[in-house]
Amino acid sequence: MGLRSRLGRARDAWSSQLASVRASEVVDERTWQDLGDALLLADVGVATVDELLTVVRQRVGRDGVDDVDGVLGILKAVLVDRLGGVDRSLALGGQPSVWLFVGVNGVGKTTTIGKLGVREAAQGLSVVFAAGDTFRAAAADQLVTWADRAGAPVVRGAEGADPGSVVFDAVEHAASRGADLVLADTAGRVHTKSNLMDELAKVRRVAEKGSGTVTESLLVIDATTGQNGLVQARQFAEVADVTGIVLTKLDGSARGGIVVAVQDDLGIPVKLVGVGEGVDDLVEFDPVDFVEALFAVDVAA
Ligand SMILES: Nc1nc2c(ncn2[C@@H]2O[C@H](COP(=O)(O)OP(=O)(O)OP(=O)(O)O)[C@@H](O)[C@H]2O)c(=O)[nH]1
Ligand SMILES: [Mg+2]
C-alpha cells in the first residue's frame, strides 16, 4: 500500500484545505491567504509558513507563474527541498549497536521498537530487546509480545528496577551472543524523584559503559499532539543527543505539516513515520513520497 492511502486523516484534512485554494481561478491575495491557512491548519507552524510562502512567492514571481496549479507545484518543490538533503539512515557500528528510544508516555515508543525489531530481524540482524521501561510491568510484557514476533530475546528487570541496569544487562547479553543490535525501550514517566531527563541521560551513559555503542537516539513524537509535541521534543533533544525523530500516528493526525515543523524547529531529521498499529505500519520517511502523497488529487470515482 502506498504512503498516499496510509496517511489517512493527514491527507484528507490537507486535501480539503487545498480544495479551496484549487478552486480559485486566479492567483491573488486570497490564494496566498488560503494557502497560508491550509499550512497553519496542517501544523506547519507560523514562522515556517511565513518562510515557505516568502520563498514560493519569490519563485512564482521569478518564473511568471499565474495559475494555482503552478503555485502548488512550486510549493511542493520548496517543501521537498526543505525536507530533503539529510541522512535518514539508522546507524550501526557498535558491538553491539544500541538504538535508544525516548519520548513522553503514550507516543508509541514500544510499538515502534516492536515494528522495527521485527523488520531488522527479518533483514538478518540479530536483535536483542531491552525493556528499559520499568515503570510498569505491562510495558515489558508488551515488548515480549513484539519480541516473540521478531524471534528475538528480551532482557527485562523487575517492576521499578533501575532502567540503566536493564539496558546494561541487555547490552552485555547481546555482546556475549555476538548480537548486532539492542533496541532499548525507556519509560515516558518515572517513579523516583529524579526527573525523566536525568534518568535518560543516565541510561545513555550506562548503555555505553560496557561493550555497546549508542548509534541512534531516537525521539518518538506523536503527530496528533501537533505543535504541543514540539515543546516536549525540545527538552528531550537537549539531554538525549537525539539523532533522529520517529513521528507516529500520522495516520490519525490531521496535522501532516508537523513533519516540516519538527525538522525545521529541532534541526533533527525525521527518520521514520508510524502510520498505524500493525507490524508493517512503519515507513522510512521519504520527502518526495510524503509531499506527493499529501498533494495528490483524488480521482473522482
Ligand atoms: N494509529 C496509530 N497508533 C499507533 C502508532 N504507533 C503507536 N500507536 C498506538 O499508540 C498507543 C501507545 O503506544 P505505545 O507504543 O504503548 O506508546 P509508548 O510510548 O511506549 O507509551 P508508554 O510506554 O506509556 O510511555 C498504542 O495503542 C499503539 O498501538 C501509529 O503509528 N499509528
Ligand atoms: Mg512503552
Image (cartoon, grey):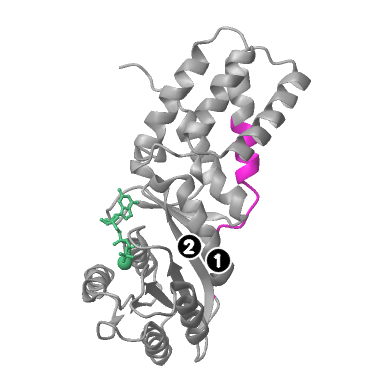
Is any atom of residue 174 visible in this view? yes
CA separation in Å, label 1 and label 2: 6 Å
Q: What element carries label 1?
A: loop
The magenta stretch spans which residues?
76-92
Indicate the quadrant of ligand 1 in the picture. bottom left
- Looking at the image, do the residues carrying marks 1 and 2 touch, with CB atoms under 8 Å apart? yes
Residue in front for this viewpoint, 298 or 252: 252
Q: Mark 1 near ligand 1 (CB under 8 Å)?
A: no
Above-or-below relation of 85 to 100:
above
Indicate the position of residue 190 as horizontal and vertical percent values: 36, 74
Quarter occupied by the C terminus: top left
User: Which numbered dot is residue 242?
Assistant: 1
Location of residue 63 by image quarter: top right
Above-or-below relation of 40 to 259:
above
Indicate the position of residue 197 as horizontal and vertical percent values: 48, 73
Indicate the position of residue 261 as horizontal and vertical percent values: 56, 45
Question: Residue at the top extreme?
Answer: 25
Was residue 179 drawn as part of the magenta stretch in this picture?
no
Residue in front for this viewpoint, 263 or 37: 37
Quarter occupied by the N terminus: top left
The residue beneath circle 2 is 219
Location of residue 269 by image quarter: bottom right
Residue displayed at 28% across by 85% down: 157
Left or right, 219 with reference to 254: right
Is any atom of residue 89 visible in this view? no
Above-or-below relation of 117 to 192:
above
